Amino acid sequence: MRHALTAFLAAVSFSSIAVAQTPTAPPPAQPAMVQPTPTPQSELAGLIARDMEGLMTLYRDLHANPELSLQEVNTAAKLAKRLKAMKFDVTEKVGGTGVVAVMKNGSGPVLLIRADMDGLPVVEQTGLDFASKVRTKTPEGVETGVMHACGHDTHMTAFIETAKLLSSSKDKWKGTLVMILQPAEEVGKGARDMLEDGLYTRFPRPTHAIAFHDAANLQAGVVGYTPGYALANVDSVDIVVKGLGGHGAYPQTTRDPIVLGSRIVTSLQTLVSREQDPQDPAVVTVGSFQAGAKHNIIPDQALLLLTVRSYSDETRAKLIKGIERIARGEAIAAGVPDDKMPVVSVKDEFTPSTYNPPEFAEQMGALLKGHFAEGRVVKTPAVMGGEDFGRFYRADKSINSFIFWVGGVPADKMAAAQAGQIPLPSLHSPFWAPEADKVIATASEAMTVLAMDILKKD
């Protein structure tokens, strides 16, 4: 591997990527106790460093101009233009706003590399001079700010650098690159939409798939990986609790949905604490309880909004059935008639768990440990966050699939957090501002190292 990578480095063009337009101006995770050993810069890191000025210009542009899920029109167009300039065969509007860039380079493996494009309905509060000032309306009509609060801007920037490094060294690898820019990761629809639009039939079917995600609990530049389940199934579940409304002074004439809803919320806690194997983690959280409009009126109904998280499909099904059972059981106990039983619905926002086949994950982890300095690559526990990259593996389990983390927490903030002096913002926080240059440089280097190994010549 090192011999192939050395030859690759000698062949890569030192020209910087084209400069982009100048921009117009889960509860927090616990910090990981990681102190990487500083070592001299690798040759590949040096090549990326030469490109960093242009990369940071692109990053700032993406950060300042985020677009919500399924609305990534301008983001997709500006990145597709760059891929075309690198001589990829580019197809736009795959699964909505998705982009597929193919580069065939002889026989060999087919490697899919993915980056996600969407921002979040979050009003940015980082104080960065290129902070997003974008305002828009959600599909539900709610006016909001928009922010790359999950770091997808770092994902896209590293993706572009990886594409540049690989496309400029075709004589050092063989096979096919399928590089995709995916929409709508935040709502769990983008990977599904691209697959349904023929990702595996219109384009070369991958034998391997890789991606990364920035991390708000690892020091900037540290790589984390997890064999097996890495991220969770994520379901959004609604419970409409029906009742009989009336005057608050005469509760005996009503069937109070607020009291019934409260019983349901309390009983739901037993699904995990008393029915779930403690060694098989799960989460059932009621994130919203909506009911009533006035002090002295008992309403006709209440609405509970839940997030439900698990790893295996069996546990997922068990939790959803348990929610239905508890909602109905509490309604029966409250004397609610059959025609007013609670209605439980699972929203069309399912994000499946992400699974790294263990043998392949260990192989990729060992490769990264052999390339980076001691302490810069660590094994990390699975998390209850969601990431629809897992759909690409689920659609074809013969694929060797691997997603890894790249830390974004500045060293001084990590040290302060470990000393108990400050809390760290989580992903999706309006305060999340990763040390972007280190995330981009580390991710570009890691993805290029992995790609060159997967596509190596015999």
Image (spheres, rainbow, N blue to C red):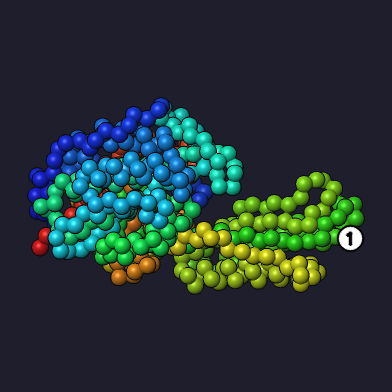
Relative to 247, 395 lies left or right: left
Relative to 457, 264 lies left or right: right
Q: Quadrant of the N terminus?
A: bottom left
Classify 348 as above or below 42.
below
Name the residue nearer the viewer: 337 or 70.
Answer: 70
Residue type marked 1? Thr
Name the residue nearer the viewer: 412 or 52.
Answer: 52
Name the residue nearer the viewer: 444 or 228.
Answer: 444
Q: Quadrant of the C terminus?
A: bottom left
Tally the numbered discs: 1
- Residue 178: quarter of image: bottom left
As helix, strand or loop, the secondary structure at mark 1 comes to: helix
Q: Which residue is pictured at 47% across the width and 56% down the height? A: 188
Q: Which residue is pictured at 57% across the width and 68% down the height? A: 319
Q: Which residue is pictured at 50% across the width and 51% down the height? A: 26
Q: Position of residue 368 (x, y in %)?
A: 23, 53
Q: How crowded is the residue under tag 1: few (<14 C-alpha within 10 Å), some, or many (20+)?
A: few
Q: Position of residue 79 (x, y in %)?
A: 32, 43
Q: Which residue is mark 1?
A: 253
* Residue 210 seen in this snapshot: yes
- Residue 148: quarter of image: top left
Relative to 455, 115 lies left or right: right
- Residue 95: quarter of image: bottom left
Relative to 118, 5 lies left or right: left
